[in-house]
Image (spheres, rainbow, N blue to C red):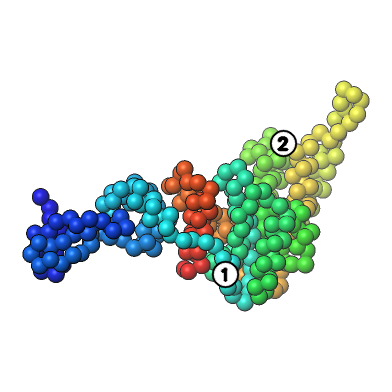
Amino acid sequence: MYKMKCPACGATHTVKNGKRRGVQLYVCKECGYQFRNSRAISQDALWRSYQDGKQTVAELAVAIGVSESTIKRRLREVEREWEQPVLPKGGIVHLDATYWGRNSGVMLALDEGTGRPLYLAFIEHEKVLDYVDAIHSIEGRGYAIRGIVIDGMRSLFEEFKCYKIQMCQYHMIQIVKRYLTQRPKLIAARELNALVSSITTKLGEDFEKEYKDWKSKWQETLNRRSILKSGKTRFTHRRLRSAMYSIDFYLPYLFTYQQPGCEGMPNTNNKIEGTFTDLKKNLNNHSGMSKENRKRFISGFFLALCEF
């Protein structure tokens, strides 16, 4: 039978002596020294194991040697409340929102240089006002915005026209593919798909020239109309035209990162997308959390990024 070893005299003649805050206590029968379970873990260490170590409540209970209800109680005692952090002097801002259920989302701004959160807010629906509040908060805390990277909400480009805006090129590719599919039958659509898919490797002026040439080459196809039963006409290749209109709208913002004064600006928002992916992976390990516990978990996740 395994016996706890007394840290004072080294004897194994020890017995259990009750619990305190979920941690087993022992007393040595040889010298009378009382001590705690060597597997005891601090609140902060417990939270890190739960949040970053991706251990479930059941796994933590087995590892520490206490009940699941004790683990849950100790986790509830951990305070994790988000406060907008002190910011560096300035830089490039990644701005986006993500969701993990109906009416449950978070608005996040990241600093391109450090990857640290600049702003966090829990939201129910993504609105332009949420983005505006984020920018006002960041600037109000003394951060000089050199540019903003976003992924396509059209009204934001008018709202933030006074800033340098980079449209995520990866999202541009996805927008076009949603209209044209991965393998379109129309040759014009195939060529447009190929052109947009190469956007990340091109200079802005080269892409604009090739796109202009494509529009000229397929002008007749783009303008072709079909007659409906009612006698009215409509464009035959409407999805192709929709893809074209999307490119026309976003084209002024696709190569901002190549402009003078925008050194260090990325052409995609992969940094913030990767952060959201890590967050959701961690959340998936702890299904069934209440709304308040989920907010506390998310706050703790981003507070840890601020400390990194």
Count of numbered tags: 2
Q: Is residue 295 visible?
A: yes
- Say left or right for 225 vs 169: right
Q: Position of residue 144 (x, y in %)?
A: 67, 74
Q: Which residue lies at the image location 14% right of the left edge and 69% below the top edge?
A: 8
**Mark 2 neighbour density, 10 Å: few (under 14) some (14–19) many (20 or more):** few
- Identity, as a three-letter code, of the amino acid under mark 1: Pro
Query: Which secondary structure lies at badge 1?
Result: loop
Viewer-proximal residue among 82 and 67: 67
Residue 229's spot in the image, x, y percent?
A: 87, 22
Task: From the viewer's side, name the closer residue of 161 and 43.
Answer: 43
Residue 206: where, in percent of width, then height? 72, 59
Q: Please tell me the numbered disc located at residue 95.
A: none
**Mark whose residue sits in front, 1 or 2:** 1
Tag 1–tag 2 contact (CB < 8 Å): no
Q: Residue furthest right?
A: 231
Above or below 230: residue 116: below
Left or right of residue 181, residue 4 in this image: left
- Residue highlighted by disc 1: 85
Residue 261, quarter of picture: bottom right
Amino acid tagged 2 = Leu
- Above or below, 246 against 121 in this view is above
Real-space Cα separation, disc 1 to disc 2, in angstroms: 51 Å
Disc on the earlier residue, 1 or 2: 1
The residue under label 2 is 186
